[in-house]
Amino acid sequence: MASQPASPSVTSILPPIEFRELQGNAALAAQCARWRQGTAVALDTEFMRVSTFYPQVGLIQVADGQGIVLIDPLSISDWQPLRELLVDPAVTKILHSCSEDLLVFYTFLKVLPEPLFDTQIAAALLGASQSLSYQNLVRQHMDIDLPKAETRSDWLQRPLTPQQLEYAALDVEFLPAIWRRQQAELASRGRLAWLAEDCERLRQTYRDEIEGHFGDYYLNFKSGWQLRPRSLLALKWLATWREQRARKRDRPRSWILKDAPLFSLAQALVQSRAELAATPEVSENFVRHEGEAVLQLLRQAATADEAECPPRQPAPLSPAQKATLKRLQDAVEVRAAELGIPAEILGRKRALVPLLQSAAALAPGRTLAPEQIPEELRGWRAHEILPRLREVLAS
């Protein structure tokens, strides 16, 4: 979210900020032992991700309300003390808009922080916009306007500049105080369980990364409904192969193969190197180094039994279904207003569409089974909005 002009009440001069830089295994182990004596730590990371698949970590910031520590990852070889802190059930991990940070921690340390408290999710459950920035969160709670000048810094350079270090420290400085306020307000509204559920769901989105299962990535291709069964199988296999290849080579997906040519190869079920080379956006270098592996998948898909193919993907919504979707969205808007939360956090379109498609595929007189309810509409949302959505679908 773009920052907004500071209001007259916003402090224009930041209070002095103190932090300590941490280097070396012994210092990390001692500090993690101290943090584990407390109840919560605020976390943030600075990283680079320009030409790699995995983020390259440049700094890890930690605050506990007593002080700020900036961990230099280039000076550490033994990360076990931090791993143990991150999964200590007695210490809450406070982050803001933590999706990228979760990827950093999983990639770098092979663990995901838990229990997790995301202050952006908490803010939305308390009535703020779904994507409230950290800068605006601090402005809202602390009447302080934070600088963002170092957002695109080179975090792998050494030494880091004083401006970089101060910027990084500010990213965790106010999180412990904001966490305490949000926690108390969520508790007073009976929504702490909502926050815990949503944070755990966010953690679970990384289960494919943890387990190395990428079999559903083909579903990100919205035109998959156009494909014949064996072409859809080819799309699934190629998408899975690309995920594995990107991670092995540590290169962005698009550097391996862009979406458009991947889809074209699956749709045409290309069978020869000549056809592969003639496909738009497929380079000679790709044909030389990856061609045989890709062609083997395509040839196997072309001769596969149709029973092995994935289920057909639903076609785009019909005009009547679009009208029903609008009624579903209206129901979400009304209930969200009653709860005082953004409609997007109660029921996003990406959850309503599969709900509608599942209902449309039911035989007359049948109702949706629990497993047919999209994951995003389960838990506390099943109580707060699902009954109204069922009424719309039944009308």
Image (cartoon, grey):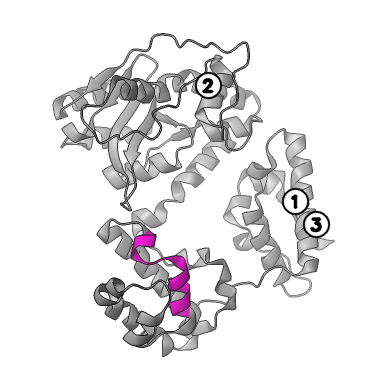
Q: Is residue 258 magenta?
A: yes
Extreme-right residue of the structure: 395
The answer to whether any part of residue 233 appears in the image is no
- Which quadrant of the structure image shows residue 243? bottom left
Please name the residue shown 55% across and 79% down the image. Answer: 227
Amino acid type of the residue tagged 3 in the rendering = Val
Q: Which residue is mark 3?
A: 392
Mark 2 or mark 1: whose residue is earlier in sequence? 2
Q: State whether residue 108 is above or below residue 160.
A: below
Q: Secondary structure at mark 2?
A: helix
Question: In the rendered image, which residue does mark 2 sit on?
Answer: 138
C-alpha span from label 2 to label 1: 31 Å
Res. 117 visible in picture: yes
Mark 2 or 3 closer to N-term?
Answer: 2
SS for callout 3: helix
- Image position of 32 (left or right of 2): left
Instruction: Kindly identify the residue that appears in the image at 67 percent across and 48 percent down.
Output: 347
Q: Are marks 1 and 3 in contact (CB under 8 Å)?
A: no
Give the secondary structure at mark 1.
Answer: helix
Q: Residue at x 50, y 78 (%)?
A: 232
Screen quadrant of the N terminus: top right
User: Within 10 Å of the Cα at label 1, are there few (<14), some (14-19), or many (20+) other Cα atoms?
Assistant: some
> Could you say which disc has been placed on residue 243 in the image?
none
Find the magenta span and give its range. Answer: 253-266
Q: Where residue 329 is drawn, which disc sits there?
A: 1
x, y percent for residue 391:
80, 56
